[in-house]
Amino acid sequence: MRALQLAAICLFVTAVIVSGIGTAQDVDDSRGEPEIEAYAPETAFVPGEEASLDVTFNNRGDLSDRGREDLETDVITAQSATARIVTDDETEDDVPFDVRTGEQAVGDIGEGTTGPVSFTVVPDADAEPGVYKVPIELEYRHAYNSEIEDGSTIQDERDETETVYVEVEITDRAQFAVVDINSTVQAGTSGLVNVTMRNVADGLARDTDVTATPVDGDISFSTDSGTTDTFVDRWEPGENRTFTYRMDAAADSTERPSTFELDVAYRDNESADATARTVRTGVTPLGEQSFGAQGINSSLQIGEDGHFTAEVTNDGPVPAQDVIVVFDNEAPAVEGVTEEAVPTDPNVVPRETQATVGTLDVGESATVTLEAGIRTDALAGNRTLNIATRYRTADGDVSVSDPLDVVVPVAEEQDVFAVSPATPNATVPSNATPGDTVRYDVVVENTGDERVEDVQAKLFANDPLDATDDEAFVTALEPNESTTMSFEVEIDGSASAKTYATSIDLRYLDEDGDEQLTDTYRLPVDVVESTDPGLLESVLTALTADRRSIILLSVGVFGIAVVYTRGRIATAATRSRDWLQRRLK
């Protein structure tokens, strides 16, 4: 009995050992292969719009013989896998994509999920809405058998190529495109940008939010905000919507399209939230408004007020409204040099400082006449005057152009009047002798090109002359018209026979009603020896009517000569004697 029990125990132990050996052999050997499926979390694509197809791979593994866990992992792992989308011309399947991404390296695809792996695709523009299966070809290496032998892992490997499919949907959700853009924004100013967008898909968009973002720093919203949102309650397929933005362009911006992005978020037909792809367009700032100017003619002359005419041209790029030409003769402050404007020509004094032009279309010109005075110490010749245009932009904002240089000639100083003694005789009587009071006639001619009024003349004289009536007046003188003005001059009896100087100046009103004073004109007064015999000679003439009277007169003259040997009486007596002798002969 005891022997039987012992035999039974030995048999059981042997069975257990044998059974253990068999189990160990099963664990050390594993066979199987990968079992891979593909998924795309975002399956909705819009015809004609580039998008990203993100694919995730799920490997469930297929084990035909189970073994140790590490051996099982070996046989179900796809090693060094690559993936590519099979194009339409490689398969009979309908693949509605233009694939922009080639073969992708995936790496090892073990049990569970791997990815996502991104492919850039563009759904065909004419793709019909619906669900499509997109074939993805996988290439990889795997160990279909893995076992432990003598403590070493032995694997049997092979290369595999298989095709998995991912389902995508071509949707008719709303999508948008810019169909027109119009801008009045100019460099250095603000303006309006009108962007017209169209719902180019067949889907309706509700509760739409359009977010606009200027990407380029040359343009910005006038509100200084980085983005602007506009709400649209209902946007039908094929419907256009225009969005208006007030924007600024930097003063140094160039005429090139600056990137402008529009993002549209909405609710689709099923009231699901959707986002359209970003729409990019370009906003091109117009160049800074420019004007040209040139001098046409000028009546400016040294020491006088005058006019100059300038032609101003709108060089564009847009029409200018309410144009006013401003003449200030000042140059803008130069950065780093001065903080204040400085006169461009200190010898020019603006009188009429602005002229209204009105609207100037692009390329249109207008002439303006402005007035200025030229200082007496200036030099004649060409002078550069400074003008500018003040105008309103298309948005009604007031703007001022850069200074415009106008070159105009300035003539030598010219007298408004020609003043000269009357001819043939300036004095009445014509022979002015010491002791006489004479009328002095002066001819005044308007040699200018404008009418002068209230011409008042004043005569000045020095000893031995005295202007006893020194003023004359004439109401007006037309150009080239002359008049004679009369004065009274007293000549001292001690005056010598020679030419003396007098002077005259004229005060008058010019064409603009401004009072002007001329320079001084110097005029001659001729004094001659007297040819009048005087009182004594007249008496002698009367007394020498007969010879007896002559004799008596002669005796009397000699007597007077003896008594008065000096002075004027003696001189007169001598002259009388000489005269008498001539008569006696």
Image (cartoon, rainbow, N blue to C red):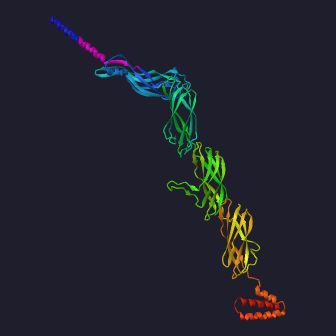
Extreme residue in the left direction:
2
Describe residue 87's horizontal placement relative to residue 111 as left or right. right
Percent x, y for residue 554? 79, 93
Residue 585 visible to an observer of this rendering: no
* Chief SS of the magenta region: helix
| Residue 139 x %, y % | 43, 24
Q: Does the magenta stretch include residue 21?
A: yes
What residue is at 68 percent from the left and 61 percent from the top?
510
Relative side of 84 to 523, left or right: left
**Vertical placement of residue 30 versus 479, above or below:** above
Q: In which quarter of the image is the C terminus?
A: bottom right
Foreground residue, 310 or 491?
Answer: 491
Q: Give the range drawn in magenta.
A: 15-35
Q: Work out whether residue 546 can be spotted.
A: yes
Image quadrant assignment for residue 317: top right
> Is residue 119 a member of the stretch shown in magenta?
no
Which residue sits at x=74%, y=82%? 530
Please provide percent x and percent y for residue 22. Answer: 28, 14
Indicate whether 409 appears above or below 69: below
Pick whichever, 277 or 143, lies toward us: 277
Residue 20 drawn at (x, y percent)? 26, 14
Q: Please report the residue visible at 57 percent of the width from the left and 45 percent of the height from the top.
A: 397
